[in-house]
Image (spheres, grey):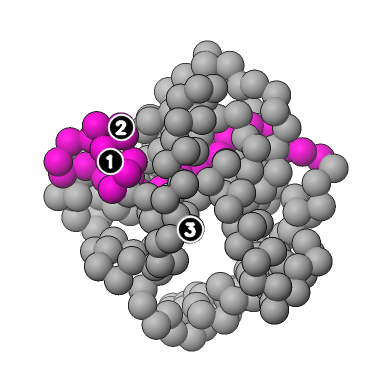
């Protein structure tokens, strides 16, 4: 059985999936287990929408509006990244992108090829299941953190089950369309998406392992001397 440490170490953003179906009963079991994620005050500020088959295809069709849309909505009150991301966070994000496209053999100057690759996000990288995390915009920062803990718990359970996943913040560009499509309540929004399925073991892109900052860069210790 996969340990927590093994699940944490093994989980990656999988960007190439096999078309092998995932049974609803399997997904239901994972979601049921994820309900034990930490939740301050037991508020459980999360909801999910899961799509496959024709329903998933209809969601993918929503992305047809994107070619004429700016890559970032300056009016979005919930941007994926803060504007003018500062150091060291900007460099970490840049490094990850460059590592990805270097692995794929797509040079920086080939903007068209990079855009074509990025568009695979909106096909869930070939995964047979798409999941959307839904939250209520009236929730505070604490509840957004709890949503993150729920999402991470689900990702680790997916890893333990021998499946793969990829968090997909890219769907933020389609929040208005998704809100209408899923008939969300007025105060609800899509937080982010997730692709779920069986990883393609032969896909070069699935060899990417992002680097993490050293502990002395992210930790401060008091009283241990």
What residue is rendered at 19% in x and 55% in y?
Answer: 140
Q: Nearer the viewer, residue 138 or 11?
A: 138
Res. 20 image quadrant: top right
Res. 43 image quadrant: top left
Q: Which mark is residue 67?
A: 3
Q: Nearer the viewer, residue 45 or 13?
A: 13
- Is residue 196 a member of the stretch shown in magenta? yes
Q: Residues within 10 Å of mark 3 (few under 14, many from 20)?
A: few
What residue is rendered at 70% in x and 37% in y?
Answer: 17
Q: Nearer the viewer, residue 77 or 59?
A: 59
Alpha carbons under labels 3 and 1: distance apart = 20 Å
Q: Which mark is residue 179?
A: 1
Q: Residues within 10 Å of mark 1 (few under 14, many from 20)?
A: some
Q: Residue furthest front?
A: 68
**Residue at mark 2:** 182
Q: Nearer the viewer, residue 10 or 25?
A: 25
Residue 33 visible in rendering:
no
Q: Are marks 2 and 1 in contact (CB under 8 Å)?
A: yes
Of callouts 2 and 3, the N-terminal one: 3
Q: Which residues are magenta?
A: 176-201
Q: Is residue 12 left or right of residue 105?
A: left
Q: Is residue 10 left or right of residue 84?
A: right
Res. 182 image quadrant: top left
Alpha carbons under labels 2 and 3: distance apart = 22 Å
Nearer to us of marks 3 and 1 is 3
Nearer to us of marks 2 and 3 is 3
């Amino acid at each position: 059985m996969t340990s927590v440490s093994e699940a944490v170490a093994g989980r990656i953003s999988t960007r190439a999936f096999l078309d092998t179906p995932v049974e609803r009963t399997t997904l239901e079991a994972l979601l049921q287990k994820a309900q034990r994620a930490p939740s301050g005050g037991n508020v459980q500020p999360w909801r999910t929408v899961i799509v496959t088959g024709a329903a998933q295809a209809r969601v993918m069709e929503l992305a047809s509006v994107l070619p004429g849309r700016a890559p970032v909505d300056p009016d979005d009150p919930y941007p994926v990244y803060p504007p003018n991301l500062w150091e060291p966070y900007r460099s970490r994000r840049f490094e990850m992108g460059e590592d990805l496209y270097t692995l794929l053999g797509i040079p920086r100057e080939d903007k068209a090829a990079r855009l074509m690759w990025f568009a695979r996000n909106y096909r869930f990288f070939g995964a047979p299941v798409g999941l959307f995390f839904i939250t209520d915009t009236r929730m505070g920062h604490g509840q957004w953190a709890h949503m993150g803990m729920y999402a991470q718990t689900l990702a680790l359970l997916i890893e333990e089950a021998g499946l793969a996943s990829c968090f997909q913040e890219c769907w933020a560009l389609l929040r208005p369309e998704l809100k209408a499509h899923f008939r969300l309540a007025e105060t609800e929004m899509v937080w982010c998406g997730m692709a779920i399925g069986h990883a393609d073991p032969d896909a070069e892109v699935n060899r990417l392992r992002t680097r993490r900052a050293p502990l002395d860069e992210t930790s401060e210790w008091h009283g241990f001397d």
